[in-house]
Image (spheres, rainbow, N blue to C red):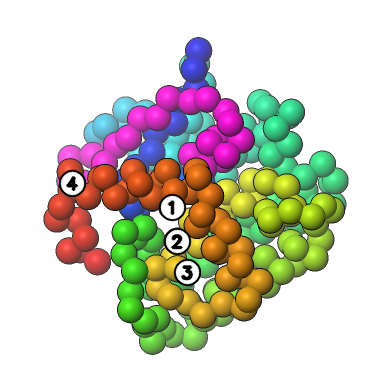
Amino acid sequence: MALQLFVANKNYSSWSMRPWLLLKQAGIPFIEQTILLGAESGPAIAKVSPSGRVPVLVDGDLRVHDSLAICEYLAEKFPEKNLWPRDSALRALARAWCAEMHAGFTALRSHAPMNVRRFLEKTPAWPEEVRRDIARIEKIWSAARAARPSDGDFLLGDFSILDAYYWPVVSRLLSYRVELAPESRAYAQFVWRLPVVLEWVKFAKEEEASLPHYDAVY
Ligand SMILES: N[C@@H](CCC(=O)N[C@@H](CS)C(=O)NCC(=O)O)C(=O)O
């Protein structure tokens, strides 16, 4: 039976974006189901998600909610895809960096919500904690680069869950025109040109037609 991934609005849902990009970039076939968030979406989400949140991966009778649990499940189900690095020390680091993204960066999240369609003219005057979050992200990227076992444009050389986990933040960094170190900028530009990312962006733009009022909220 085909895997199904339930996601929310592509323009706003960075949590949905992570497993969606992972599946696409790894070439794992799946059926996508979209629940657009709004006043009426609660019952539709509750039908598939015990936490009342998406993303949710459905594999037969199993429903895996939470983006990180989905990524871990996919890594176990498709070991040949090497979704985590093979080296156990590097795998531990990659997991720790993903966990930071999963649990943290709250200042950046609240001051710079993801909006794939929006590009500001200049970076807002953010509080210090947002700048600290951005500096930490750049540090993680450069630590990953320093630790990578192979050359390649992905954070650890080859594509891994770590990339899928940090790609949505690239949208924020570009949208809000954040000044980045040259190596971080090069990674952000590399990400923004990837076919799977462009596909997500295209769908995010198409959603605008069905929800024209949404951008007014931001
Ligand atoms: N920690 C969860 C967060 C999931 C989450 O917050 N999803 C949002 C969409 S981005 C949601 O489903 N919201 C439902 C609602 O607000 O009604 C994960 O990693 O999957």
In the rendered structure, which amino acid carries the disc numbered 4? Ala
Question: For the point 49% across and 86% down, which residue is it?
Answer: 128
Look at the numbered disc 4 and give the secondary structure of its residue: helix
- In which quarter of the view is residue 218 placed? bottom left
Mark 1 touches mark 2? (CB < 8 Å): yes
Q: Which of marks 4 and 1 is nearer the N terminus?
A: 1
Look at the numbered disc 1 and give the secondary structure of its residue: helix
In the rendered structure, which amino acid carries the disc numbered 1? Ser
Question: For the point 50% across and 62% down, which residue is it?
Answer: 170
Q: Nearer the viewer, mark 1 or mark 2?
A: 2
Q: Earlier in the sequence, mark 3 or mark 1?
A: 1
Q: Residues within 10 Å of mark 3 (few under 14, many from 20)?
A: many
Look at the numbered disc 3 and give the secondary structure of its residue: helix
The dot on residue 209 is 4
Question: x%, y% of residue 68?
Answer: 57, 44
- Which stretch did the figure color magenta? 19-42
Residue under pointer 2: 171
Residue under pointer 1: 14
Q: Can residue 41 be seen in this view?
A: yes
Question: x%, y% of residue 30?
Answer: 48, 25
Residue under pointer 3: 173
Question: For the point 40% across and 30% down, which residue is it?
Answer: 32
The residue at label 1 has a CB less than 8 Å from ligand 1 = yes
Mark 4 touches mark 2? (CB < 8 Å): no
The residues bearing labels 1 and 2 have C-alpha atoms spaced at a distance of 9 Å
Mark 2 touches mark 3? (CB < 8 Å): yes
